[in-house]
Image: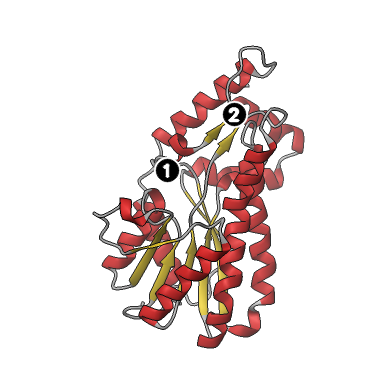
Amino acid sequence: MKTDALPKKVVLITGGSSGIGKSIAEYLQKKNYMVYGTSRNPEKFTDNSVPLVALDVTDKETIGVALSEVLQKEGRIDILINNAGVGITGPLEETPEDEIKKAFETNYFGPLNLIKAVLPQMRKQKGGLIINITSIAGYMGLPYRGIYSATKGALEITTEAFRMELKDFNIQMTNVAPGDFATNIAAGRYHAPVREESPYNKPYSVTLKVMNDHVDAGKDPELMAKAVYKIIRTKNPKGHYRVGEQLQKLSIGLKRILPDKVYEKMLLKFYKL
């Protein structure tokens, strides 16, 4: 059963200045939500129709300041969408530890700290919805994307636990896992360099091209916006949603039913390894 969206519900979405986040923010704004996006440098995006507040998900102090700013203006936060994230690629053996930690700080600890910060307000309101944008990559260990998969998989699993812990407070939480979308995420990724002397030189180069080609040919981010809008209008959202190419969504189901070695061979073929 669906519920009509209440006018002017307050939405805070991290990473709302570009890509999937911007598409979701603009779409919800058109649907009569009061939407605030976030950016580390909102002054750079003067043409945004959605107001941006300064927030760095890796900095707890800015999280507190941003939430206070929205609450001062609106008095409530009905929906938090944890969308900000970073990509990271490279051979696991060669990816610098500090880059691995940065990816986890942005993709996992950032959303976790935002959730912790907003929960007291949602309890005070006696309700709220938190949507975590994860990735289909979080359901499987992908070659040369192992760290990215791990960060998104960690958030998926943490959400499952949160849903049970929050059941008494009328606070709902769900994951939305996108596949490849036509955004600038590939350009913004940390790419471990393709080193001439590396034993991974050839396979990493091949896989990197496959990954970038998939993003370039990805779907329109508005598809994600429509999916998020539908979830918001759903009375009792599920724990997991997947949005993207049918083959990418199917890959999750195949992992459940195929023997490990068969599934591994399927991934190797897909990435031309």
Task: Tell me where residue 34 sits by quadrant.
Answer: bottom left
Q: The residue under label 1 is which amino acid type?
A: Phe
Residue located beneath label 1 in the image: 181
Q: Nearer the viewer, residue 181 or 18?
A: 18
Q: Residue at x 46, y 43 (%)?
A: 245
Q: In the rendering, at what x and y percent does residue 246 appear?
A: 48, 44
Q: The residue under label 2 is which amino acid type?
A: Ala
- Residue 67 position (above or below residue 224): below
Mark 2 Cα shell of 10 Å, populated few (<14), some (14-19), many (≥20): some
Q: Callout 1: helix, strand or loop? A: loop
Image label count: 2
Q: Callout 2: helix, strand or loop? A: loop
Badge number at residue 133:
none
Tell me the quadrant of the picture where the C terminus can be found.
top right
Q: Counting residues from the N terminus, which is met first, the one under dot 2 or under dot 1?
A: 1
Q: In the rendering, at what x and y percent does residue 171 appear?
A: 57, 78
- Residue 164 position (above or below residue 27): below
On the question of residue 235 being in view, the answer is yes
Q: Residue at x 70, y 16 (%)?
A: 199
Mark 1 Cα shell of 10 Å, populated few (<14), some (14-19), many (≥20): many
User: Coloring scheme of the render?
Assistant: secondary structure
Q: In the rendering, at what x and y percent does residue 208 appear?
A: 54, 26
Badge number at residue 192:
2
Q: Residue at x 48, y 64 (%)?
A: 81
- Residue 172 position (above or below residue 40): below
Q: Nearer the viewer, mark 2 or mark 1?
A: 2
